[in-house]
Amino acid sequence: MAKVELKQPIVQAIAEEIKDAESVVLVDYRGLTVAQDTELRKQLREAGVVYKVYKNTMMKRAFEGTAYEGLESCLEGPSAIAISKDDATAPARILCKFAKDAPALELKGGVVEGNVYDVAGLTELSKIPSREELLSRLLGSMQSPIANFARVINQIAEKGGADAVEAAAPAEETAEAETAEAPAEEAAETPAE
């Protein structure tokens, strides 16, 4: 069996994995300890990110004719690939965070939603919160005014309801009118010189 026939299934597997991917990030993993590599794989797996090591020539062939063709310049030295089909920023976020504690891990480049990014671009993308975090922030900001309104209504109900508030309002208006009339009366009572 020829070598090309043996390599073709691997190229097909890579092409299938990247086909519907939101993002693909390439890293140089040289220098990571086994414990660090195991921890990195665990974090990526928990986020739903596929992380594998392939030969550069295999990845290059799989990238041909796709949006990932711009990553060919990054395929030098040992390369691992992180692929996410759900969260576009997950690979960059996890890998950048991990690289802070493990400087041996070096990002090479990536493609996020069809755009090719260098290391600086991936670092900026890693600062974007996850989809779940953004949704929870949105929900929190939507619930805040509703919760405040509910508290005000509850306080009104505790003070005797809307009738008590309406009765208090005319009394306040009468008191304000009396204080406004008082200075005018005092000015009339003072004798003119």
Image (spheres, helix red, strand yellow):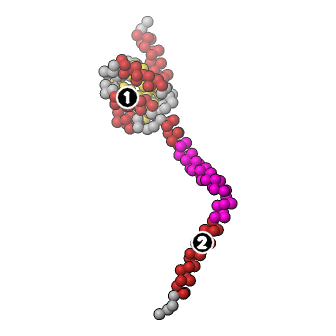
In the displayed structure, 165 sits above or below 9; it is below
* Residue 151 locus on image (x, y percent): 59, 50
3D distance between C-alphas at marks 1 and 2: 67 Å
Could you say which is closer to the camera, residue 11 or residue 179?
Answer: 179
Q: Amino acid at mark 2?
A: Ala
Q: Nearer the viewer, mark 1 or mark 2?
A: 2
Q: Can you see residue 38? A: yes
* Residue 96 locus on image (x, y percent): 37, 31
* Residue 47 locus on image (x, y percent): 48, 27
Could you say which is closer to the camera, residue 153 or residue 138?
Answer: 153
* Residue 115 locus on image (x, y percent): 43, 35
Label 1 Cα neighbours within 10 Å, binned few <14 / some 14-19 / many ≥20 = some
Q: Amino acid at mark 1?
A: Phe
Position of 157 compared to 85: left or right? right
Which is nearer the N-term, disc 1 or disc 2?
1
Could you say which is closer to the camera, residue 75 or residue 37?
Answer: 37
Kindly indicate the quadrant of the structure image that contains residue 74. Answer: top left
Q: Residue at x 51, y 30 (%)?
A: 86
Quadrant location, the N terminus: top left
Q: What mark, if any, has residue 98 been given in the picture? A: 1
Q: Which residue is mark 2?
A: 175
Q: Residue furthest bottom?
A: 193
Magenta residues span: 139-168
Position of 76 compared to 68: left or right? left
**What secondary structure characterizes most of the magenta part?**
helix
In the rendered image, residue 105 lying in the magenta stretch gets the answer: no
Q: Residue at x 45, y 16 (%)?
A: 10
Q: Can you see residue 74? A: no
Position of 108 compared to 172: left or right? left
Local secondary structure at mark 1? helix
